[in-house]
Image (cartoon, helix red, strand yellow):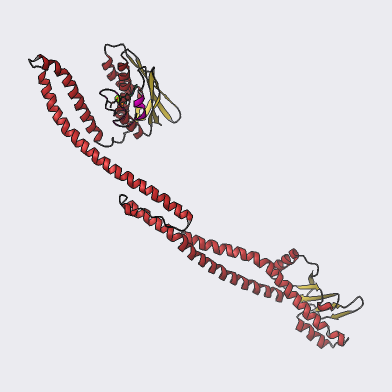
């Protein structure tokens, strides 16, 4: 209940209304005290007027007058020379004197609060102005008990009233929040839930109709997002179907091509010189076609398995890659070297890192081959607090412009004859699986530098 929006509103409203009531209570309790005392003074003034008729009252009458007025003494100063005085015996000495004529608001408030706070019964003297110009000053002595009881009563009534008001306000606000906010929010939540169940179903997409502008904005944003998502899902679905079709096609094509490969091998032994001379070209083309279909099939096998990361010696992996690649440059002057520190240990899946590095080094070697002269390839490594950095630099002819725009996209990055355009995209996928990435640092007519970043 208190974790819901409307529940919170309920509690907060009660707290705030009560707080507001405290601010109202303080001045009004001081007002109440002044009025109580003024009423006593007024009654005392009337009682003392009996002295005007008869200067010597009988002690019984005097006592009765004072009892009715609920004070011990009254002194009414009529003018400079005349005073009317009613007296009876005090039960205890006068504890304090309050002059209502000169008290400031703050005095009145603090006197009222200290009266409330002090449960002891005291005798106090109160000085006030006589009513209707009946004299210049009037003074009464009285006990505090009645005053305090009346103040407590008054305070209780105010408290009950404010409790009722705040409960009522809170209830109204609670209902208002339910209707105005919680219901529309629930509607959005319901939509999100049912959308999540069947995101392809366009009917589940929310139609914005909230009246509160912030909520409406949220609904519109949600609608846009769902529309895009549904679109993307359909697209993905279509691509998946297409991919499946391509895989089947590649599969059958590979079988057909294998037969052609077999047959074209035989052509080499043909007696016909024309056939014999064409055979090698045919064989190369066919095997290229076979490689293409195989790679496509391989790529179609969806995701790479997630990497089995462990501590591996980078030096050893780079050495294996280089040894393999050197076989291709046998007899040429191209130099493939490594300057990876011997003791460098990295966290990676050794097979996957090997494949990614092989692709980079092979691309570099092919770029040098294309250039036609010899060149150098160097693999180096360094590290900082967060990353291992593995660099592959070559002196090949640089990346062709067309290759750059789709460098890491499958089947699109290749501009090389015989290239499929999968090498970099597969390598990128493998390294991303490690939480790292491959970047092209620079490339120009003098060469190219790729970098693998592996997080620690
Ligand atoms: N070191 C490099 N120097 C120059 N060009 C490069 C280099 N590395 C990649 N390229 C260019 O980027 C293209 C894409 O490379 P990628 O490895 O993705 O595909 P590919 O080598 O053409 O084919 P695959 O690797 O699938 O057999 C290459 O065709 C080549 O033109
Ligand atoms: Mg390649």
Residue drawn at (58%, 62%), measured in percent from left and top?
16
Q: Is residue 72 above or below residue 345?
A: below
Q: Residue furthest front?
A: 274
Q: Quadrant for ligand 2? A: top left
The percent coordinates of residue 280 (x first, y second) are 16, 18
The percent coordinates of residue 452 (x first, y second) are 38, 27
Looking at the figure, which quarter contains the C terminus? top left
Residue drawn at (14%, 31%), measured in percent from left and top?
255
How many labels, in total?
Answer: 0
Residue drawn at (21%, 27%), measured in percent from left and top?
291
**Range of residues picked out in magenta:** 401-421
Residue 112 visible within the image = yes
The percent coordinates of residue 52 (x first, y second) are 87, 85
Q: Residue furthest right?
A: 81
Q: Nearer the viewer, residue 455 or 362?
A: 362
The percent coordinates of residue 175 (x first, y second) are 48, 65
The quarter of the picture where residue 404 lies is top left
The quarter of the picture where residue 368 lies is top left
Magenta run includes residue 110: no
Q: Residue furthest left?
A: 271
Q: Nearer the viewer, residue 102 or 249?
A: 249
Taking the image as shown, residue 397 lies to the left or right of residue 98, namely left
Q: Is residue 129 above or below residue 208?
A: below
Magenta run includes residue 405: yes
Q: Nearer the viewer, residue 287 or 359?
A: 287
Q: Give the main secondary structure, helix, strand or loop, of the magenta stretch.
A: loop
Q: Is residue 274 above or below residue 199?
A: above
Residue 91 visible within the image = no
């Amino acid at each position: 209940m208190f974790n819901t929006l409307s529940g919170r509103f309920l509690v907060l409203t009660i707290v705030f209304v009560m707080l507001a009531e405290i601010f109202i209570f303080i001045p009004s309790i001081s007002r109440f005290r002044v009025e109580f005392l003024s009423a006593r003074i007024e009654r005392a003034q009337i009682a003392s007027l009996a002295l005007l008729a008869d200067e010597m009252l009988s002690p019984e009458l005097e006592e009765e007058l004072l009892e009715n007025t609920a004070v011990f003494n009254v002194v009414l100063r009529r003018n400079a020379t005349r005073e009317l005085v009613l007296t009876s015996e005090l039960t205890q000495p006068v504890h304090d004197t309050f002059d209502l004529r000169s008290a400031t608001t703050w005095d009145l408030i603090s006197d009222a609060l200290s009266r409330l706070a002090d449960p002891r019964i005291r005798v106090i003297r109160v000085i006030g102005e006589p009513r209707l110009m009946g004299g210049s000053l009037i003074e009464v002595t009285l006990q505090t008990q009645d005053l305090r009881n009346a103040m407590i009563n008054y305070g209780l009534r105010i408290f009950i009233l404010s409790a009722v008001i705040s409960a009522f306000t809170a209830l109204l606000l609670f209902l208002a929040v339910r209707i105005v906010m919680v219901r529309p929010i629930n509607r959005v939540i319901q939509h999100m839930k049912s959308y999540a169940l069947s995101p392809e179903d366009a009917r589940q997409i929310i139609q914005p109709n909230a009246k509160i502008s912030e909520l409406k904005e949220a609904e519109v944003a949600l609608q846009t997002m769902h529309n895009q998502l549904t679109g993307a899902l359909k697209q993905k679905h279509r691509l998946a179907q297409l991919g499946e079709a391509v895989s089947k096609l590649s599969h059958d094509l590979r079988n057909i091509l294998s037969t052609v490969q077999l047959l074209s091998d035989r052509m080499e032994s043909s007696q016909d010189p024309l056939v014999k001379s064409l055979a090698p070209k045919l064989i190369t083309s066919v095997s290229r076609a076979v490689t293409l279909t195989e790679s496509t099939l391989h790529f179609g096998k969806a995701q790479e398995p997630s990497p089995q990361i462990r501590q591996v010696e980078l030096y050893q992996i780079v050495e294996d890659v280089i040894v393999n690649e050197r076989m291709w440059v046998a007899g040429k002057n191209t130099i493939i070297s490594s300057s990876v520190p011997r003791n460098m240990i990295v966290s990676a899946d050794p097979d996957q890192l090997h494949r990614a590095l092989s692709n980079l080094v092979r691309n570099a070697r092919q770029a040098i081959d294309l250039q036609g002269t010899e060149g150098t390839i160097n693999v180096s490594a360094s590290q900082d607090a967060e990353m291992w950095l593995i660099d592959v630099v070559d002196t090949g002819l640089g990346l062709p412009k067309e290759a750059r725009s789709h460098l890491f996209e499958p089947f699109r990055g290749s501009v090389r004859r015989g290239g499929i355009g999968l090498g970099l995209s597969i390598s990128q996928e493998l390294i991303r699986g490690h939480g790292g990435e491959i970047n092209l640092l620079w490339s120009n007519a003098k060469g190219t530098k790729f970098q693998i970043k592996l997080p620690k």
